[in-house]
Image (spheres, rainbow, N blue to C red):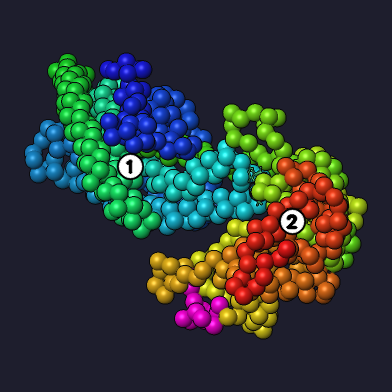
Amino acid sequence: MLHRHERRQDEGESSPQGSASERLLFGGPLLHDALWTRHKTAFFEMSLGAMAVRLPRLVAFTVRLAWRADRRSLWTVGAGELVRGVSQAVGLVAVNGVLAAVLAAGAIQQRVQAAVPSMVVAALTGIVGALATSASTSGTGRLEPKVERVATEMYLEHVIRVELAAIEDAEFHRLLDSAQYGASSARRMTSYCTGVVGSLVSFVAAGGVLTVLHPVLLPLLVLMTLPRSWASLRIARARYGSYLRWVQHARAGRLLSQTLLRTGPAPEIRVHDVGPFLLHHFREMSQASEAEQARLASRAARVRLLAAALTGAAAALTYAALGLLLVTGVMALSVAGTAVLAIRTGGQSLSALVLQVNNLYEEACYVSDLERLIEEAAARTIPVGGLPVPQRPSLIRFENVTFRYPVDQGVDASQARPALKDVTLDVPLGRIVALVGENGSGKTTVSKLLAGLYEPDGGRVLWDGVDVRQLDRAQVFAKVALVSQDFHRWPFTCRMNVAIGRPARPLHEADLAAAAAYAGADEVVGQLPHGWDTLLSKGYKGGHEISGGQWQRLGLARARYRDADILVVDEPTSALDAKAELEVFEQIRKLADGGRTVVLITHRLASVRHADLVHVLEKGELRESGTFEELLARPGGVFRALYEMQRAQFRGVALSGQQQPA
Ligand SMILES: Nc1ncnc2c1ncn2[C@@H]1O[C@H](COP(=O)(O)OP(=O)(O)OP(=O)(O)O)[C@@H](O)[C@H]1O
């Protein structure tokens, strides 16, 4: 047997340095940075005994899921497996009766006649067993997809309710990633569990019959089966370990082949002659993978041979013991015949049991991630309920607000600069409030806190004097429409891309048209091959791609369709041409005239001319606040300096036929 640390190295996820090509291209083996990769090694460290201890918990979890998914099928499976086991035991006893009758003294006709009742019982148990097996198989087949659906729903239900900060937390995200495999694992666990229960029942049935026949037969059964079980387990794990190693080379090779096929790098691949270079390394990685698979094949053959030798020795020992019992007259010939049959069925059940438990454990790693995710998600869920948000609030105030984004593990959070530091500002409702500042100054963060997406680490966000933490968050969200910089481009139809601004409301064509006209998206819709019904996702039949500026208009239309009191627009015109930009700002201004609040984030300082109030942020701190004119009039002010800088870019560029300004 391999030494423990050798085995780890031999069977673990990575070959430590990777192939020469992998070292050259990736600096080492190409490994996933994901939580689930840890399961692969954890799996190898689990002994059979430890697995047996965990077994009841695993079965209980699967049964609970199955209970939620479909009770009737669960009952069918349970009863089916039980009936199968019992009919197996009764069948063995009947076979014993047949053998005893046939091997007894007397004329052959009489002996056969005496065996008939037992034969009938054996045949009946065979029929009942087959019926029970098919009932269990169909029950498992019905249960599997339902269990997967229930587990997926559990997962998604929890995920959509967690705070944004949790979704952005790298560690939580890793768990999220890994737990998504939990649903399909739960599905597979259903059939493994049925297998485990079935094998266990069969083993107990065969063991029970053997014990009744003679007490020494049960230990003999175990003795004969254990080496075989150990060997099959060993081979399964060796195969898995080797798979992990060759899949690592295959993964690297796949990355190269995919890169060679993609459109993005295609020009560079051709002009810089990257193709033959990558092809050479693809071949090298594939050969490393082939070598590993060849190594596995010969290793599996060796283990299989050893297993066969051990099983043979155990069988010889068992049959020698049976022979001894026969010769010494301790056991009758008929009993020995039944014992051989029982040892065969019992042995098969035990081997199957060991393998099924092994499979069960492997799946359980993912299912336990799912369990953990559900626990953690529950702890990080957006609170439900709270004080009602005022019908027409008049002021949102940030009071000494400090906020830090969650940092990745290993990074000292206290060292990281807060995204907002001691910020105090007002957002009077029914007005246009602009947030300006350089990249990374904290504008988007202010808008997200305003929308209730984050809670401040220090200070308070007050809605008419009430801390947002006490307000009903669902009502806060309902007050806000958001057009973020990276608003989502849903892979749905154009109509749905606007209507998703208020998904709970029945589709209303007139409102859709009004929202589109507001954002200038009506022109976009008019140019699409199927108008509102065009699928905005290239790569699918009938799918169509639109430009960044056209998307931006749809994003604005979506926010307009939402028809909320507060519209937060983050760089709404970055992809628009100059004419469209002017139009959009004009429209935004009209919104405020209608009593809505607009929080406008932009780098184009000239566009904030119509804002009622401008807040200037710098490195997470509020530097200045005032109207456009006030800020421009402030000597040495940050806004004035930024504005001057932007203006200077255009100064000196004279149009033909125009005089350059003095
Ligand atoms: N999701 C996030 N996770 C971690 N840090 C973030 C995250 N979003 C922003 N930050 C950091 O917080 C700070 C403020 O970012 P924010 O996006 O609020 O700035 P901004 O003024 O809107 O910038 P820009 O003009 O580039 O959009 C930056 O240092 C940024 O790196």
Write the start and end of the magenta stretch as one range.
524-536
> What residue is at 47 percent from the left and 69 percent from the top?
545
> What residue is at 41 percent from the left and 29 percent from the top?
41
Secondary element under disc 1, as helix, strand or loop, is helix
For disc 1, does the CB lie below 8 Å from ligand 1?
no
Secondary element under disc 2, as helix, strand or loop, is helix
Q: Nearer the viewer, residue 153 or 130?
A: 153
* Residue 237 shows up from this direction: no
> What residue is at 39 percent from the left and 72 percent from the top?
541
For disc 2, does the CB lie below 8 Å from ligand 1?
no
> Residue 264 is drawn in which quadrant?
bottom left
Q: Nearer the viewer, residue 603 or 517?
A: 603
Hey, which residue is sitting farthest right in the picture?
465
Give the crowd class for mark 2: few <14, some 14-19, many >=20 residues within 10 Å.
some
- Residue 643 image label: 2
Taking 161 as reference, is 231 above or below it?
A: above
As drawn, is 436 to the left or to the right of 377? right
Instruction: Give the label, 2 or 1, closer to the camera.
Output: 2
Q: Nearer the viewer, residue 373 or 204?
A: 373
Marker count (numbered): 2
Q: Amino acid at mark 2?
A: Tyr
As drawn, is 121 to the left or to the right of 33? left
> Residue 548 is drawn in which quadrant?
bottom right
> What residue is at 34 percent from the left and 23 percent from the top?
9
- Residue 68: x, y in percent? 55, 52
- Residue 155: x, y in percent? 56, 50
- Residue 593: x, y in percent? 83, 74
As drawn, is 288 to the left or to the right of 178? left
Question: In this figure, which residue is indicated by the disc labeled 1?
Answer: 251
Which image quarter is the C terminus in? Answer: bottom right
